[in-house]
Amino acid sequence: MSDNVKINVNGLQIESEPNKLLIEACEDSGIHIPRFCWHKRLDPVGMCRMCLVEVDTPRGKMLVPSCTTEVSDEMVVDTESEIVKKAQEGVLEFLLINHPLDCPICDKAGECPLQDQTMAYGPGESRFVEEKRHFEKPIPISEIILLDRERCILCARCTRFSDEISGDPLIEFIQRGNKTEVNTFPNEPFKSYFSGNTVQICPVGALTSTSYRFKARPWDLKSTRSTCNGCSMGCSIELNSSQNKMLRILGVDNEHTNQGWLCDRGRYNFEYLNSDQRIKAPLKKTESDREETTLQDVYGDLSKIIEDRSNKITFLLGSNLTNEEFTSFNEFSNQLGNNDNSIYLNEDLLFKGFFDENIENAKIEDLNKSDAIIIWAEDLKETLPILYLRVRQAVKNGVKLVVFGHTNSTLADISDVYYSGETVSNNFEIVKDISKLKEIKEHIKDKNVTAILGKASPSQSDKSIEKLFTYLKDNSNLRLLNAFNGGNSFGAFQTLGSVKGNREFSSEISKETTDLLFVVGADPVGKSIFSSNIKNIINEIPTVVALDLFMHETSELADYIVPTSSTLGEKEGTFTNIEFRTSRIDKLIPSPGQALSDWEFISGLSNFCKFEGMSESLTDLNNKSFDSFDLDTKPTFDNLDKPRNLDGIINTSIPKIITTDESIEFSDTFFVGKKLYGDKVTERHSKSISLLGSSQFIEGNETTFEKFKLNSGKCILVQENIEITVSCKINPSLPDGLIFFPKNRRNINKLDFSKNIQILPSHSMEVLNVN
Amino acid sequence: MSWDEKLIKQAKKIVKLYPQKRSALGPLLHLAQSKDGYISDDSVSVISELVGITEVQVKSVSTFYSMYKQEPTGKYLLSVCKSISCEINNSNSIIDIVKDFTGLNNNETDEEGLFTFEAVECIGACGGAPAIQVNYETVEGLSTENTLNLCEWLKNETPDLVVADELQNQFGGTKSFDWAIADNSGTTGSVPGFQTLNTTKDKK
Ligand code: SF4
Ligand code: SF4
Ligand code: FES
Ligand code: FES
């Protein structure tokens, strides 16, 4: 690194790294330069001219845009001179010429950079008397985003985001000059997994989300910082509520994880919190139906079962709980005299993972610093969307990308090597000798490699991925991210001591081994590959308790249903992400009815059972969760709340996952995976997400569809008494003869993939239902 | 795809000329325009696939340049220069005459599809200002009278081919200098022809 440069800004000496943009260097030293188009995470374009400053040049003082000018040694800059002020006034006057100034009905008002900067730097009075340009007031550019072209100041933040960052440029400037507008191609909506970010970075009220429109004024919002638990990325978020209703989620710029961005699931999957379908009181099954009961009654009934020490008790936990809650279940299970083997995590694709002292855990930012990235995992774009953005960013910075298998077909275009059909079989086994693959060797041999490894399909055994791992470890300087994507699954691995998954649950649990089952925040009957098995098991276990937010296919089977709080804004705790970064989960709104946190329930039940030695408060649980970690600064509430730790604290405690390596036999025509939006119960109750995640389809390449005679664009899937009409989407990156099924889409999740499924061409356009 | 095989083949040949596919965007838009007389959304989709960028990105480029027409033009595209040299040589009255004769405002096409009128920036004939282009064939040194004659002639004769030199002789005045390319062979529509793209129309 070369030395810092010294520059003089407004008479002050400041230091900056060389090649930094002037606007950024000033910002770092606390000198704010107004701007519209410049955004820290986007390439500069110098579109708006709001950031003009005066710089001394050999030809005298000159106005230059500070967002496209790099600092150089001994530069002399004035950001507040008369000329600069005049320029700022001029720029604002121009921007306001066509701006409708409908602030009273604009959602952005109150947090609007145009409003704020006009106040601070504007001319104060308008001289414009002509007619402003007019467009149809907001037009929908997708199901969830509206565009008001009159308000747009043409900063190109949204278009640059969709081009540079998310890689799906479906919005662009149309026309030129005075006629320029942002728009989509006719009938080609802005369907991006990351579209909500454009709303957040738009410096005016041109882009708005249907979910937040006209709901509140920024100055009425309560807010807190928290962590998204949608997947194991653990993006930093800001929760906004008004009148005890969650109204909006914003991305917070956490350098280590999301860098300000969120996927649309993380951003919009909160509307369920306000749903009137939430369970509000404990329920108990009766002969014919269910009736409301009290917590005390539930405690009473359960304690009777628990006190009989011969009864065996099992837990099936969803991965969306907080670390503290996992710890609480762990304590509880230990009190029962269970060894911790009685706890299962509601995950289908668990494998042992690559965790031990000799394996270096990668950090997300290592992606950018390595020579090559190797991916063998479920589709990152669908399961760890922001990690997908980080991979894209690394590739943009010149890191080589090697992708194995057809799951990550969206990365095919930007990868240097894409191993599909011939190297990785349709069943996700590696069919060639890895050491003989020339292409990968060139990129990894003795280089810094970051691998993202995870099980890509339930039909895959552990062997192939282990082979790849060994090869990488022997040949490169390897760091590794284990690609488990379920919410706080890394927190579960660490705080539960040891954990197993749905596969193990469905082969080990029966009424012989379990008398009482707790299913917590999990819907395996609705969602798991092992659904039918698990359903039978749950049906035969004498007593089943579901702790959940909603009634769904699993909680419906339970004898007791206890309403619980959501990890999103309704409880406090901590969350541990894919790089073992632990950050804060915070509470902003009250839970509906009698809903309580899972740990509160367990704590109440333990009190009822007169258990001794249980943690008594959330703080105790929090301390206990990280007790054994070998860290100077443990991720306790106290530490996490310190400003320097807001981005979270990394730990290296090694988790233990116990799995049986039995792959399920799938026909090698099928390949089953998740889509970002699907049919989870919370998604069904979030309007925005349910709009996005409702289409049913299968994917294949053209040859495959031809082979199955599926050229009409629609087909019918038939299995026993199930019949579903789905559309056929062409995905040229899939190998021949392989058909992709989105497992988390309605009705498709009813199919049993270990059995035969008939695919029939359809000419009718109507959608049939499951019988 | 709505382009026939021949056109696709021609397009693919153009794409091959460039190290990066998207560089072929400009020429392909010309090809699209020579097919329909304007850039149809259908063509945009075809081009987007050929060069591997999204449709809206293609649309963005095609709407940026005013010579890529977004709508079909009339048989004769009348582009009157409104830039400085022409303006000081009375282009305003030329514009008025064309407007009056055709009854059109800027960028409008008449119902019969005969004329499209546009007032454009400098067409590089400043020395012979004021100037007009008929389907991009330039006529210099116009007088108001000759402008009217030109319009009437086009309306009455409706020639399929217009050739700059002929128009100049018949309706033009002082020419800047004889700079025209040797192959001044005329156009049959409102689409500029390019020999390199093989989009020139019938030669005389
Ligand atoms: S819509 Fe917003 S972000 Fe996009 S160009 Fe207009 S002002 Fe900028
Ligand atoms: S990537 Fe994962 S953690 Fe980040 S916003 Fe999306 S769901 Fe939430
Ligand atoms: S912020 Fe520099 S030109 Fe817009
Ligand atoms: S100004 Fe009219 S041709 Fe140049």
Image (cartoon, coloured by chain):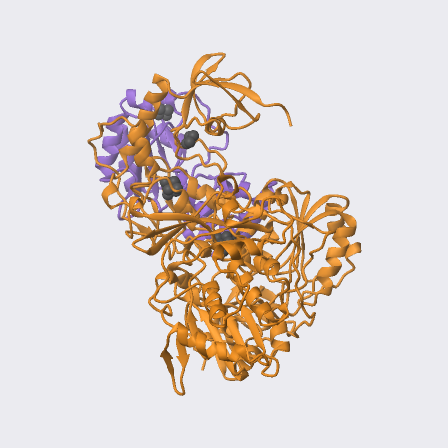
Q: Quadrant of residue A552?
A: bottom left
Viewer-nearest residue: B166 or A17:
A17
| Residue A679 appears in the rendering | no
Task: Say left or right for B150 vs B25.
Answer: left
Residue A299's spot in the image, x, y percent? 45, 74
From the viewer's perspective, tell me whether residue A106 is left or right of residue A543: left
Q: Quadrant of residue A376?
A: bottom right
Colour applied to chain B: purple
Whether residue A225 appears in this view of the structure is yes
Q: How many marks are shown on the rendered structure?
A: 0
Of A290 and A381, which appears nearest the observer? A290
Residue depicted at 61% across the width and 78% down the height: A509
Q: Quadrant of residue A156?
A: top left
Which residue corresponds to the image point at 70% horizontal and 65% vertical from the top-left? A462
Q: Residue furthest left?
A: A129
Q: Is residue A383 above or below residue B60?
A: below
- In percent of width and height, residue A181 lies at 35, 42
Q: Measuring from the top left, give residue B122's x and y in whole percent.
A: 37, 27
The colour assigned to chain A within the rendered structure: orange
From what the image shows, is residue A305 above or below residue A406?
A: below
Residue A441: percent from left, percent from top: 76, 49
